Image (cartoon, rainbow, N blue to C red):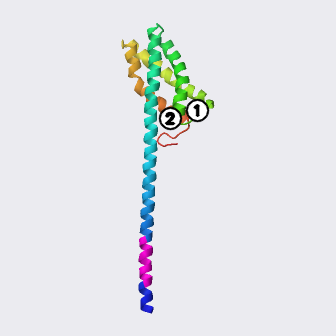
Amino acid sequence: MITREKPRTHISLRLISKKSKSMTSSIDTVFSMLSFSLKAMIEVKLLKFAKIGVLNTIFGYSVFSLLIFLGLHYQCAVILGTILSVMFNFNTIGRYVFNRCDTRLILKFALVYSIIATLNICLIHIGVTHHINVYLMGAILLLPLGSLSFILNKTIVFGEKLFGIY
């Protein structure tokens, strides 16, 4: 029986070893699924931002263009367009991108848009002084200022890490 005991112990160790490998495999699978889920969540957030960004950009540029068309100076058009955009964008970005629409954040949100509007005015002024069409300058600045706006809103207004979910 002593000889039988050793093989059983050996078999038991093999079973434990197989179970441990199975558990390791299961843990790896869980981590893989979590990793996939995190990637999916990031992609969803970026997709939401892109969709809302397009909507907000259309709204903001339409207001800006309408005000220019109505004869307002580009500085006034940017300021008035920004005020209207802040109210519209706070709701869309807060609700649909960051899932937070806490009205206490509107001042930070307005501050970010003030920074963006100031940059917009300065850069359009540079373009206009170099005889670049004001509509074209407004269009050229959409992507860089939109990107900067997202970064500032994500980090300053909604308190999320730049390269993370939260």
Report how far apart the C-alphas of labels 2 and 1 lie in the structure.
Answer: 10 Å
Above/below status of 26 relative to 56? below
- For the residue pair 83 and 91, the one nearer the viewer reads as 91
Rendering coords of residue 27 (x, y %): 45, 61
> Badge 2 local density, few (<14 within 10 Å), some, or many (20+)?
many
**Residue at (59%, 28%) from the top-left corner?**
106
Q: In which quarter of the image is residue 83?
A: top right
Residue at point 49% right, 16% down?
78
User: Callout 1: 10 Å neighbours few (<14), some, many (20+)?
Assistant: some
Magenta stretch holds residue 86: no
Q: Give the range drawn in magenta.
A: 8-18
Give x and y (percent) for residue 41: 46, 43
- Does residue 114 show up? no
Q: Residue 101 carries which label?
A: 1
| Residue type at numbered disc 2 | Val
Prevailing secondary structure class for the magenta stretch in the rendered image:
helix
Looking at the image, residue 70 lies above or below residue 102: above
Q: Which residue is drawn at 48% across and 39% down?
A: 162
Which mark identifies residue 97?
A: 2
Residue 99, x across and y down, in percent: 54, 36
Visible residue check, residue 67 = yes
Q: State the image coordinates of residue 65 (x, y, percent, origin top left).
A: 44, 14
Picture quadrant of residue 131: top left
Q: Do the residues labelled 2 and 1 touch (CB within 8 Å)?
A: no
Quarter of the picture holding the N terminus:
bottom left
Specify the quadrant of the image occupied by residue 133: top left
